[in-house]
Image: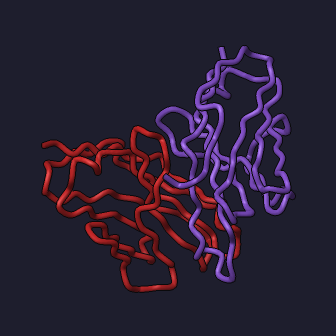
Amino acid sequence: AQTVTQSQPEMSVQEAETVTLSCTYDTSESNYYLFWYKQPPSRQMILVIRQEAYKQQNATENRFSVNFQKAAKSFSLKISDSQLGDTAMYFCAFLAGGTSYGKLTFGQGTILTVHP
Amino acid sequence: ETGVTQSPTHLIKTRGQQVTLRCSSQSGHNTVSWYQQALGQGPQFIFQYYREEENGRGNFPPRFSGLQFPNYSSELNVNALELDDSALYLCASSRPGQRRWDTEAFFGQGTRLTVV
């Protein structure tokens, strides 16, 4: 079984600044995928970014990028040029390779507040 | 908006009662996963349905059961409701491809269940 840990219950950042959310995981799998999801007050879970464990290059999606440290089992999310719309709960999630896409293991979440 | 719709949006039930939650998957998606998200926590995987068959189950008792219909919509049934069943219930639809992780899981907005 795998576990995902997010040690920051809450974070805040000023608009236009950069913030990093932390995530660590534990698994014995060699093939897996990692994700960051955003859940705004509307409750709908939205995929922000994903990383394939076999890829050394860190994933980037516009203002969002990850720092994937496989040996340390660490997967942090960096949000650059923070916007008010980034205010949400952020979840780190794990998917073991070979399993169906929907069986995700989530962390406890980090509430991010972006202040004007 | 993802095209995944859940009904009802809110529900209040009494302990011991039974409840049915519904999920209409995105067009073309044949896989539906259900998650339970307690307040302030990350979602926990309940089970998944693929082409009308259960395709994996998390650590939930048998009183949590489900169905998937030929049009790939799905129901989550919970019998003998307990106070701890109060949570947001999320469904996610996906369509595993040749490389399963290529297919994003799209989440609905959830059903907020309160058991009193």
Quadrant (top left, top right, bottom left, bottom right) of the C terminus of chain B: top right
Q: Is residue A56 found left or right of B33 in the rendered image?
A: left
Q: Is residue B55 found left or right of A12 in the rendered image?
A: right
Quarter holding residue A111: top left
Residue at the spot x=26%, y=67% of the render? A63
Quarter holding residue B75: top right
Q: Is residue A88 found left or right of B7 in the rendered image?
A: left
**Above or below for A83 versus B9:** below
Residue at the spot x=29%, y=51% of the render? A86
Q: Which is nearer the eye, B29 or B62? A: B29
Quarter holding residue B94: bottom right
**Above or below for B3 versus B89:** below
Q: How many marks?
A: 0
Estimate the x, y position of residue A92 in percent, counting from the top left.
Answer: 46, 57
Q: Which chain is purple?
A: B
Residue at the spot x=57%, y=47% of the render? B108
Estimate the x, y position of residue A60 in percent, counting from the top left.
Answer: 33, 75
Estimate the x, y position of residue A14 in percent, counting from the top left.
Answer: 13, 48
**Above or below for A32 versus B4:** below
Estimate the x, y position of residue B19 in percent, counting from the top left.
Answer: 77, 27
Residue at the spot x=70%, y=76% of the render? A98
Per the rendering, the colour in which chain A appears is red
